[in-house]
Image: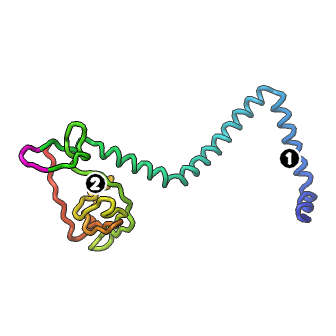
Amino acid sequence: MKNIFIFIRRYFNFLFFLVLQILSLSLLVRSNQTHEAIYAGVANEITGKVNFQYNKVQNYFHLKENNRLLLEENTRLKNLLRSDFEGADSARVSLVDTLVRDTLGNARKYIWLPAKVVSNTVSQQLNYLTLHRGAKQGVKKDMAVIGPQGVVGTVIDVSDNYSRVMSLLHRNSKVSSMLKKR
């Protein structure tokens, strides 16, 4: 408390000048419409910049939730793609669960399952990924793993809630592919 009084006594003239300056500016702004309009524009610009920076920080802390919502939406939309269904094949007889058919009777070829990478190696000869999806979530051995940029690898081991994926960077990784005809 003593330090506050010493501070005020030492800088009294400067603090008194600041108080009078703020009082005179507020009286000027209130009495003159031109100055009031200029002040409103400057104040709006400053508060807009402050709110914009605050919003950027707030959005940064909500990125995890936004990413989760986007992942769910992408999975739902990918499961609706027409390319995920194929027409009935009359050459073979198979029993297909009716829940995986669309309204035209086409059977689903595959289902998209979102997953998070728990661990990943990239600098060894035997590179693996561990995903937090397993047998309880519908993952099976030899399933393909696809990321936003393309093929990631193949599932080689599945537990109840985790699966191990052989990455394309693995020494023994083999992917069957064909060139598309133009």
Q: Of the residues under marks 2 and 1, which one precedes in the sequence?
A: 1
Q: Position of residue 139 (x, y in %)?
A: 29, 61
Q: Residue at x 66, y 38 (%)?
A: 45
Q: Residues within 10 Å of mark 2 (few under 14, many from 20)?
A: few
Q: Quadrant of the C terminus?
A: top left
Q: Nearer the viewer, residue 166 or 29?
A: 166
Taking the spot 91% from the left edge, 62% from the top edge, the residue there is 6
Residue 4 within the segment the image draws in magenta: no
Side of 44 relative to 166 (left or right):
right
Q: Residue at x 35, y 49 (%)?
A: 75
Q: Is residue 161 above or below residue 58?
A: below
Instruction: Find residue 167 and report its horizontal and vertical position in percent.
Output: 28, 65
Up the image or down, 169 lies above or below 15; here it is below
Residue furthest left as drawn: 91
User: Is residue 49 left or right of 160 when viewed as pictured?
Assistant: right
Q: What range is drawn magenta here?
A: 89-94
Give amino acid for label 2.
Answer: Gly
- Neighbourhood count class around disc 1 (C-alpha, 10 Å): few under 14, some 14–19, many 20 upward: few
**Percent coordinates x, y for residue 157 in the rendering:** 27, 69
**2 and 1 marks in contact (CB < 8 Å):** no
Q: In screen coordinates, is 171 left or right of 60?
A: left
- Is disc 1 placed on a helix, strand or loop? helix
Residue nearest the viewer, comparing 81 with 161 = 161
Residue kind at label 1, given as amino acid type: Leu
The part of the image, by quadrant, that contains residue 121 is bottom left
Q: Position of residue 114 (x, y in %)?
A: 35, 55
Residue under the image location 91 percent in, 59 percent down: 10
Structural distance between the alpha carbons of marks 2 and 1: 63 Å
For label 2, the SS is strand
Q: Which residue is mark 1?
A: 18
Q: Residue furthest top?
A: 33
Q: Which residue is mark 2?
A: 150
